[in-house]
């Protein structure tokens, strides 16, 4: 991945940065608030990162653009809000959410690591993935992720394991997650039974008919399992129907656009108020001039791709529903008539006399489940050992880098993250992140640029800073850093003296005025490539 260009703006003000090179780049200024953070966060925002913009900057009012080479293919990204447009080889793809964009990114641009979430292996969120090589200026926290969202630091480690082909789960004798769910379910039942005094008889005849089976805990387990399956199917059907409705809307949209295409060719469509022949198609964030045949055809291609993705998602939901329905059929097939009667009339049962017996039986089952969990965990020790070895390799590499920049330093890394509530301060924080990011780059062979906003924050000494820059240069890959110089450093042309470094000076920008009207025409030309009407 090589970053060629980034920009952000609207029809009133904009900024474009196209001076990046495939080497170590340093964006600097002689004071704060010159726009360095806006450029870096805007770049990452354009490709799906949940950016932290400076307070007072209304990012929702702007478009964010980037031109990036990935695996020798040129991609252009344009984002506004949570909508992203991708331009590749004159083909446009429109994504109405970051989730849709992630799905496409993983399938067609760059395969993302898969980690276990909600009981399934799923591609990692883009914000989590980018944290492997990107460090923003704000909300740094050495004890956790910078942006957590729905992720945690164990997800970060699991992502690393996945990149090293050591998944967090493996083939085991028992399904560990199902066992844990069973244990949780039995614990809950024991608590419920202990609290229970009696159940009033609503229908004595029914209660009498099934009293012989009322205290059989297997029946209760079957009933609970059926209830869980029905709830799961209902949830899956809701999600499937939602995706199916979206697919139908997209199919209807294609019909409308094709109809519009015929009408335009016949010269019959124009505005009755102003007489204009320009027709606009709008999604949540973007407006496209679809009277332009090139734009219209690319919008159609993008919608067709979205329909294909929706079909795949619907098929996946149907598959999951079929699995759950098969489980129901299997349970009912193996159940006796008494079991079915119990399930049907279980709310009518009075079982207060045998509560102790039921609790005793449940506790026996709980012990059996716990034994299986213990035995099962012993079967994934080798997997845990490999994971431990990977972390140890990264920490060893972190210590190697640390001794390069501070051979007499006292820091001792024992994990990728510090303990909760414990964090580094001053220059130690920057040293920690430097060592961590470069160690991850080395061990995981990351193919993305290293991007660090405010790379020498915390009163880092000039000696350590120079060593860090030397190490970045040695990587022989694209690195993008930002820095604010003191007056004496700026006057001495500190960075201009460096070899093999591309320096970009933002000092001429006024305080908080990086967005300027003289970039608007060029920025509008970028928007026009996407068929955007501002």
Image (tube, helix red, strand yellow):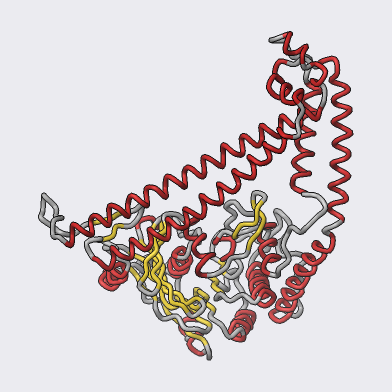
Dividing the picture into quadrants, the one containing residue 158 is bottom right
Q: Is residue 23 left or right of residue 122?
A: left
Using the image as rendered, state which of residue 476 and residue 218 is in the foreground.
218
Q: Is residue 325 left or right of residue 280?
A: right
> Which residue shows up at 74% across the image and 47% down it?
177
Check the image and report above or below for 476 versus 418.
below
Q: Is residue 407 left or right of residue 472?
A: right
- Quadrant for the C terminus in the image: bottom left
Residue for point 59% across, 39% down: 233
Q: Position of residue 270 (x, y in %)?
A: 14, 55
Q: Residue at x 79, y 34 (%)?
A: 186
Q: From the viewer's side, name the closer residue of 62 and 358.
A: 358
Residue 474 placed where, x, y %?
62, 86
User: Does 504 sit above or below residue 266?
Assistant: below
The reply to whether residue 230 is visible in this rendering is yes
Residue drawn where x is 36% and y is 52% of the image:
251
Nearer to me, 404 or 457: 404
Residue 13 horizontal/vertical position (percent): 29, 65
Judge whether residue 56 can be spotted in this image: no
**How many numbered marks have been drawn onto this rendered protein structure?**
0
| Nearer to us in this view, 448 or 264 | 264
Looking at the image, residue 104 sits to the left or right of residue 393; the answer is left
Q: Position of residue 129 (x, y in %)?
A: 59, 64
Looking at this view, name the residue that lies furthest to the top.
Answer: 204
* Quarter holding residue 15: bottom left
Residue 306 to residue 231: above or below = below
């Amino acid at each position: 991945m090589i970053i060629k260009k980034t920009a952000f703006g609207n029809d009133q003000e904009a900024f474009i940065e196209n001076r990046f090179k495939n080497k170590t780049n340093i964006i600097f200024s002689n004071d704060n608030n010159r726009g360095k953070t806006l450029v870096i966060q805007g770049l990452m925002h354009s490709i799906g990162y949940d950016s932290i913009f400076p307070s007072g900057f209304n990012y929702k009012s702007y478009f964010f653009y980037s031109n990036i080479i990935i695996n020798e293919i040129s991609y252009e990204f344009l984002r506004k809000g949570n909508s992203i447009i991708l331009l590749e080889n004159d083909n446009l793809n429109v994504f109405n959410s970051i989730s849709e964009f992630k799905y496409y990114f993983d399938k067609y641009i760059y395969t993302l690591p898969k980690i276990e979430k909600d009981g399934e292996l799923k591609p990692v969120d883009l914000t989590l993935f980018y944290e492997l090589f990107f460090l923003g200026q704000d909300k740094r926290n050495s004890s956790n992720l910078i942006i957590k969202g729905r992720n945690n630091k164990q997800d970060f480690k699991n992502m690393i394991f996945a990149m090293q082909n050591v998944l967090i789960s493996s083939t085991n004798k028992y399904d560990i997650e199902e066992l844990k769910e069973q244990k949780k379910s039995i614990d809950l039942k024991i608590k419920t039974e202990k609290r229970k005094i009696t159940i009033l008889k609503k229908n004595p005849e029914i209660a009498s008919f099934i009293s012989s089976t009322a205290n059989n805990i297997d029946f209760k387990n079957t009933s609970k399992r059926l209830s869980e399956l029905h709830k799961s199917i209902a949830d899956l059907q809701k999600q499937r129907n939602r995706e199916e409705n979206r697919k139908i809307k997209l199919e209807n949209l294609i019909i409308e656009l094709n109809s519009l295409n015929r009408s335009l060719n016949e010269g019959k469509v124009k505005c009755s108020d102003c007489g204009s022949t320009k027709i606009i198609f709008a999604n949540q964030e973007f407006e496209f001039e679809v009277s332009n045949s090139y734009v219209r055809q690319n919008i159609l291609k993008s919608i067709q791709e979205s329909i294909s993705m929706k079909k795949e998602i619907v098929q996946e939901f149907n598959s999951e529903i079929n699995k759950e329905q098969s489980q129901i059929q299997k349970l009912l097939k193996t159940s006796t008539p008494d079991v079915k009667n119990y399930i049907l009339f279980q709310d009518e049962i009075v079982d207060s006399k045998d509560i102790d017996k039921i609790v005793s039986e449940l506790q026996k089952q709980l012990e059996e489940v716990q034994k299986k969990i213990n035995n099962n965990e012993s079967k994934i020790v080798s997997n845990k050992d490999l994971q431990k070895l990977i972390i140890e390799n990264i920490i060893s590499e972190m210590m190697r880098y640390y001794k390069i920049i501070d051979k007499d330093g006292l820091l001792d890394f024992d994990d990728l993250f510090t303990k909760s509530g414990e964090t580094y301060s001053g220059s130690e924080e920057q040293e920690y992140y430097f060592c961590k990011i470069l160690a991850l780059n080395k061990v995981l062979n990351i193919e993305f640029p290293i991007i660090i906003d405010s790379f020498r924050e915390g009163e880092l000494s000039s000696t350590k800073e120079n060593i860090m820059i030397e190490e970045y240069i040695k990587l022989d890959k694209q690195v993008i850093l930002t820095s604010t110089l003191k007056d004496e450093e700026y006057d001495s042309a500190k960075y201009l003296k460096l070899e093999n470094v591309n320096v970009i000076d933002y000092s001429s920008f006024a305080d908080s005025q990086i967005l300027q009207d003289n970039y608007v025409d060029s920025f509008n030309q970028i928007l026009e490539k996407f068929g955007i009407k501002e």
